Amino acid sequence: AFGILSFVFRGRDIPQAEPGMGGTAPMTDEARGALGRRIFEEATSACASATAYEACVAEAAVRAATRALVPELCDEISDSVRRDQCVFEVAQRRGDERMCSRAGSLTDYCSSIFQSDRAQKDGNMELCLGVVNPTERERCFNAIVVTKDRAFCDTLGDLRDRCASIVF
């Protein structure tokens, strides 16, 4: 289930100024926090009459946190698994690996995606070795090697056999 998240949130959305505020400069953290809080409050106003109050609040927090890119809003979620997913989603959307440390059970996976992205961008298979999550590490290797040939593999030293097993 977590693998799906890495593909959905690879695109990074940085909130811009609200329409009518002038300009398209990125929002300040203070403005982002205010926007997130407003979204959360509007969404939770309907939760009082919901039969599944906790689920309603969790959904409101996720919606506000991922739209405004404010991980602190994820703290409103009582379920630790969903809270970790929320922080993970915000970190990915914001492109901020430092937020991964707040992602609880998804910390290693979150960091692995950033490490894998760097390795792929640089075309550096050695960076893939630092990817903690085994599934993401494999994806990292494959993404780099899939466009290469045997000659590329011959230049890799210790990673030569690993590369060749993917190319052929």
Image: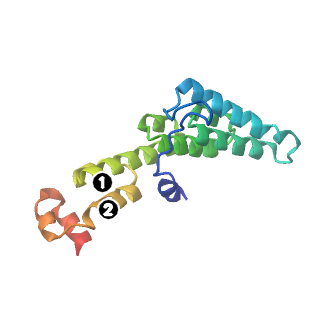
- Residue 54 position by quadrant: top right
- Residue 56 position by quadrant: top right
Left-right relation of 7 to 144: right
Q: Is residue 38 above or below residue 121?
A: above
Left-right relation of 99 to 72: left
Q: Position of residue 167 (x, y in %)?
A: 23, 71
Q: Position of residue 8 (x, y in %)?
A: 52, 56
Badge 2 or badge 1: first in the primary sequence: 1
Mark 2, residues whose alpha carbon is within 10 Å: few (<14), some, or many (≥20)? some
- The three-letter amino acid code for the residue at tag 2 is Ala
Q: Tag 2's secondary structure?
A: helix
Residue labelled with disc 1: 120
- The three-letter amino acid code for the residue at tag 1 is Gln
Left-right relation of 129 to 158: right
Residue occupying the point 54% across, 45% down:
89
Q: Is residue 102 above or below residue 122?
A: above
Residue placed farthest to the bottom in the image?
168
